[in-house]
Image: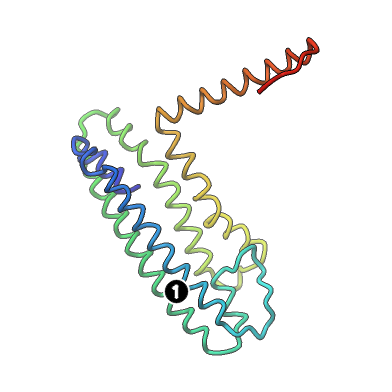
């Protein structure tokens, strides 16, 4: 998304060329690959950890920081190594996002009209909000001091970084598409009309059909 915003603001005339279907497929494959590989490694390592302190995790999923606490051998060091690999991937993505927005900020400052700058900023704000929520909650979840740790707080923080961003991403980005807005509006209008038709038919004693 940061690259999409970069091309849309910094190189709008080349948007169709730089972000064609092939480029989108490549970016999606890169995103899924960098997410799937660490997840696969963490999952494989989780099943190989000898657990001597029970197998119940005080979380709604097997969160990585919780697992070494249940392990009774030095094999948890492999999990630490995998965390380092995941952190390096995350840092690479973060550097790419920051670099994109540095270029976007320079381009926005060169826009002469205030309305143009506001429009450019509004296109970046949803992505910045989601990324900021994800990064701050992940940092807090993994680096917070043990003294302020509690099951309820850990649960809330985990939901904020693992559930909320993926849930709101389609809503934030897709509803900026006018065609999708029109399709959703048409669908909602059709549903409302069907419900009204059924209510009127029921009132008249006839059978309603969807």
User: Badge 1: few (under 14), some or many (20 or more) residues near its Cα, within 10 Å?
Assistant: some
207 vs 13, left or right, is right
- Color style of the picture: rainbow
Secondary structure found at label 1? helix
Residue 144 at x, y percent in the picture: 53, 68
Q: Is residue 141 left or right of residue 208?
A: left
The x and y percentages for residue 5 are 30, 43
**Front residue of 157 and 206:** 206
Vertical arrangement, residue 172 with respect to residue 77, above or below: above
Find residue 150 and report its horizontal and vertical position in percent: 65, 67
Instruction: Looking at this view, name the residue that lies furthest to the bottom.
Output: 73
Q: Residue at x 35, y 37 (%)?
A: 123
Determine whether, in the image, residue 189 is placed left or right of residue 22.
Answer: right
Q: Identify the residue at image location x=52%, y=72%.
A: 43
Q: Residue at x 77, y 16 (%)?
A: 202
**Coordinates of residue 58 in the picture (x, y in percent):** 67, 69
The residue furthest top is 204
Q: How many marks?
A: 1
Identify which residue, 151 or 30, lies in the foreground: 30
- 86 vs 205, left or right, is left
Snapshot quadrant of residue 154: bottom right
For the C terminus, the image quarter is top right
Say above or below: 195 vs 133.
above
Residue that badge 1 annotates: 83
């Amino acid at each position: 998304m940061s690259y999409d915003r970069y091309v849309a603001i910094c190189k709008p005339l080349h948007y169709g060329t730089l972000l064609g279907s092939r480029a989108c497929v490549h970016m999606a494959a890169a995103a899924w690959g960098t997410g799937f590989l660490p997840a696969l490694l963490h999952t494989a390592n989780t099943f190989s950890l000898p657990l001597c302190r029970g197998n119940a995790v005080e979380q709604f999923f097997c969160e990585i920081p919780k697992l070494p606490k249940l392990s009774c051998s030095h094999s948890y060091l492999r999990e630490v190594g995998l965390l380092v690999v995941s952190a390096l991937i995350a840092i690479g993505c973060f550097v790419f996002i920051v670099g994109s927005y540095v270029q976007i900020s320079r381009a926005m400052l060169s826009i002469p009209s205030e309305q143009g700058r506001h429009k450019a900023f509004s296109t970046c704000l949803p992505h910045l909000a989601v990324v900021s929520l994800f990064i701050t909650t992940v940092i807090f979840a993994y680096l917070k001091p043990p003294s302020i740790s509690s099951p309820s707080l850990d649960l809330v923080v985990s939901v904020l970084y693992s559930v909320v961003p993926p849930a709101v991403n389609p809503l934030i980005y897709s509803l900026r598409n006018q065609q999708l807005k029109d399709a959703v509006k048409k669908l909602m209008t059709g549903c409302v009309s069907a419900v009204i038709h059924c209510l009127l038919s029921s009132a008249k004693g006839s059978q309603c059909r969807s």
